[in-house]
Image: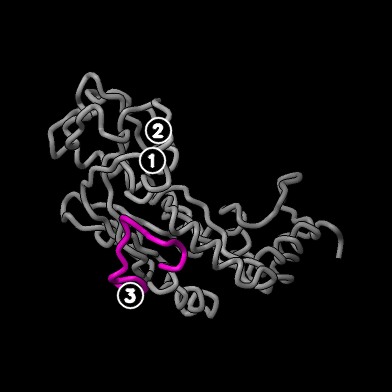
Amino acid sequence: MSDLMTTRELAEFLRLNEKKVYQLVREGAVPHVRVGGKWLFPRSHILRWIDERVQYEQDVHIVGSDDVLLARFLSSYSRRDPSGTLAFYSPIGSTGGLEALLKKKGQACCVHLFDSETGEYNLPVLTRYFSDIPYVVVNLWYRTQGLIVKRGNPLGVKGIGDLARKDMRFINRNEGTGTRVLVEHLLRSERIDRDDVRGFAHTVDSHLESALKVFFDEADVAVGIEYITHLVPLDFIPLQEERFDLVIPGELWQMRLIQQFINTIEPAHLTTLSDSLPGYQFRDTGRVLFQS
């Protein structure tokens, strides 16, 4: 076989039909090059692509929302057997994670998306993303979201309505994050226009970055999880509790790798990661909340 395979040769090599190969090309899922109007596939790249797929079956790839405890948990999970299964985490936001999951760029996605119509977290939103695709939802934990302010709350912040004050500098989260969805919902509930919030367009990518902006006096207030204010010396004004869940495609749910990972998600192990975990609740941790 030559270094460049044709579509037919690749189909035979992968034991697929040519129609499936063309689908992989359209999705950008397989290495390819177009020469003289024909799709060709470098053999060395295909072999590496196969090796990567095999490795993908050995490691856990998590996408979705930013969470300090989850990062600690996944680091602990990887340290158990570094030569075996590792856990990789890409905190790209709840909606970004769901889109990546649909494109098979992850095996599971952590989400905390508030649905304004029902007042519930995650499940109503997921029905819109996975209308024709089986999936399973497992609870990780509950978190408290609130306003992050300087120690002593020198500006006397009391609630979400204070974001519209002229003397208040707000730092926002990036679009697609569950925190941003919550902020926009709370502003609508208070009938506050986003243009009236000084700094609404200024965004950061994580809870820690939000807290640091306030700590270093680049902002007066942010919205984030309570736990972050125990890592950075700041004050916290609670707004509401949210449910933080893990979404797994149905086709992956029965994989031994996934089941082994799910079995490690239990309160006793989580509480050993820190002396105290303010802002987290584990009453449903590891529980299957939905299975389509």
Callout 2: SS: helix
Say few, some or many: other residues with alpha carbon within 10 Å of mark 2 (under 14 / 14 to 19 / 20 or more). many
Rendered view: 82 above or below 217:
below
Residue 209 horizontal/vertical position (percent): 44, 38
Type of the residue with mark 3: Arg
Q: Are marks 1 and 3 in contact (CB under 8 Å)?
A: no
> Which labelled disc corresponds to residue 215?
2
Residue 216 position (above or below residue 138)? above
- Please provide percent x and percent y for residue 83: 70, 70
Residue at the location (48% across, 50% down)?
Answer: 91
Residue at 72% across / 66% down in the picture?
51
Q: Residues within 10 Å of mark 1 (few under 14, many from 20)?
A: some
In depth, the one of 258 and 129 nearer the eye is 258
Residue flagged by tag 1: what amino acid is it? Pro
Q: Position of residue 10 (x, y in %)?
A: 72, 65
In terms of sequence position, does the residue under pointer 3 or pointer 2 come before the other? 2
* Quadrant of res 58: bottom right
Q: Amino acid at mark 2?
A: Phe
Mark 3 surroundings: few (<14), some (14-19) or many (≥20) residues within 10 A: some
